[in-house]
């Protein structure tokens, strides 16, 4: 048994859904609606993710996909996404292309795309359904905000042509790119799916052209691959946030409160081992922002953690990145240690048991906790 019908516009994928749970839904003509339009089209990351998000909900799990912008078909749809020129949650219309559209996610300024609209209206339901958490819980609220900040907002900005930095300000500051990173993004991967090879491709497309129906079927196949790819990124981000990031809050809080035993100014923090990992940076920045003790350093400079849960595990010393600074650290490990290993590092640092310090100075290692702590204590003073 198939679920409610999902349709998309073929020249730039837009979606309409017939949800079963709504009262008095129209009765769609499935035979007519599933006839795909013949024109080819280019799909983007936001609509690929929007369809995947909807299909996470039980109502839409088995929904067939139809791609259209035919007004007569849209008129029969109970829910319309990314087409139709209207955003009206009361009538379940979720388009963002209209001139007057300026809707943003709460407490943000980035105009929403189809991905952001679907997430804003269905995100908490999706999170609760995927994690088993109570939709009314504070944990769902926290994850809802984090997933938007970490992932969905970038889809919105990309589709609406909103850069991370103002180009005029970069130009005024004389800042230029060191290399071209256009191909290193989710959006660029989705773009490649538009032209991905398929089993139906022929060796000589010029002499063996495909029918319009086959071209449309190929386009739909490529779209579904792109949708699965974007969806996997969402699923991984949600799993990591739920199973690793969220539980890490209490562990980082405890470590932050205990930091003065390792350095009187609180510049060194020690984390325990956890099999699922401890994503600590976000939590640390939040704790530091709320701290109001003028007697200690406002910033932790180094974080120590074991490589495993074994009693003889080696330990790492990680320089804390500047908030929002990417690869820039608050304080690198000492220059004289960078790129040096083993016995030579013991000699240079004056600390036994050293394993390595990365050439960029963001991380190092020692065979023991005591050795790693000595590295951090020496580094904060150099």
Image (cartoon, rainbow, N blue to C red):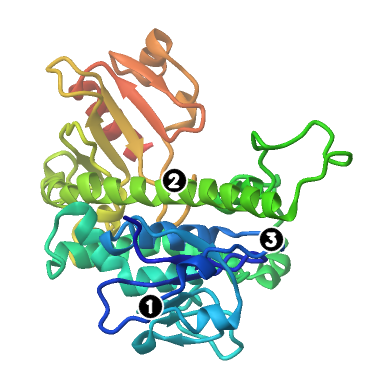
Res 176 seen here:
yes
**Residue at label 3?**
41
Q: Position of residue 16 (x, y in %)?
A: 47, 72
Q: Nearer the viewer, residue 99 or 10?
A: 10
Instruction: Check contact, mark 1 vs mark 2: CB within 8 A.
Output: no
Seen in the image, is 90 located left or right of residue 115? left
* CA distance separating discs 1 and 2: 59 Å
* CA distance separating discs 1 and 3: 28 Å
Residue located at (41% from left, 44% from top): 331
* CA distance separating discs 2 and 3: 44 Å
Marks 1 and 3, the one that precedes in the sequence: 1
Looking at the image, residue 66 lies above or below residue 224: below
- Could you say whether the residue bearing mark 1 is in a helix, strand or loop? loop
Residue located at (46% from left, 26% from top): 358
| Residue 143 in which image quadrant | bottom left
Q: Nearer the viewer, mark 1 or mark 3?
A: 1
Q: Nearer the viewer, mark 2 or mark 3?
A: 3
Q: Nearer the viewer, residue 34 or 161?
A: 34
Residue located at (73% from left, 55% from top): 212
Q: Which mark is residue 27?
A: 1
Q: Nearer the viewer, residue 91 or 25?
A: 25
**Residue at label 2?**
329
Q: Position of residue 60 (x, y in %)?
A: 34, 62
Instruction: Check contact, mark 1 vs mark 3: CB within 8 A.
Output: no
Q: Residue furthest bottom?
A: 100
């Amino acid at each position: 048994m198939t679920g409610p019908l999902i349709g998309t516009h073929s020249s730039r994928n837009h979606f309409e859904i017939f949800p079963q749970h709504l009262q008095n839904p129209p009765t769609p003509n499935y035979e007519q609606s599933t006839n795909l339009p013949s024109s080819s089209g280019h799909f983007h990351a936001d609509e690929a993710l929007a369809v995947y998000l909807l299909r996470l909900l039980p109502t839409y799990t088995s929904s067939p996909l139809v791609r259209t912008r035919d007004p007569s078909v849209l008129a029969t749809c109970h829910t319309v996404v990314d087409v139709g020129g209207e955003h009206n949650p009361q009538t379940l219309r979720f388009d963002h292309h209209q001139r007057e559209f300026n809707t943003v996610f709460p407490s943000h300024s980035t105009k929403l795309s189809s991905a952001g609209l679907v997430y804003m209206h269905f995100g908490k339901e999706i999170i609760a359904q995927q994690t088993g958490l109570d939709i009314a819980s504070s944990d769902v609220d926290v994850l809802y905000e984090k997933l938007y900040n970490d992932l969905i907002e970038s889809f919105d900005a990309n589709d609406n042509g909103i850069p991370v930095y103002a180009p005029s300000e970069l130009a005024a500051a004389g800042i230029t790119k060191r290399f071209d990173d256009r191909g290193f993004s989710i959006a660029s991967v989705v773009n490649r799916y538009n032209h991905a090879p398929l089993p139906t491709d022929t060796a000589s497309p010029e002499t063996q052209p495909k029918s319009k129906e086959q071209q449309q079927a190929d386009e739909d196949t490529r779209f579904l691959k792109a949708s699965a790819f974007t969806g996997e990124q969402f699923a991984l981000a949600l799993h990591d946030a739920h199973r690793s990031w969220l539980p890490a809050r209490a562990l980082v809080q405890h470590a932050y409160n205990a930091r003065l035993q390792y350095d009187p100014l609180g510049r060194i923090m020690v984390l325990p081992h956890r099999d699922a990992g401890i994503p600590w940076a976000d939590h640390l920045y939040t704790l530091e922002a709320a701290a109001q003790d003028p007697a200690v350093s406002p910033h932790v400079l180094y974080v120590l953690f074991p490589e495993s849960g074994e009693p003889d595990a080696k330990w790492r010393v990680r320089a804390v990145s500047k908030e929002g600074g990417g690869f820039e650290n608050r304080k690198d490990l000492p220059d004289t240690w960078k790129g040096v290993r083993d016995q030579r590092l013991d000699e240079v640092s004056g600390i036994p048991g050293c394993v390595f310090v990365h050439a960029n100075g963001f991380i190092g290692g020692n065979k023991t906790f005591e050795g790693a702590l000595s590295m951090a204590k020496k580094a904060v003073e150099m």
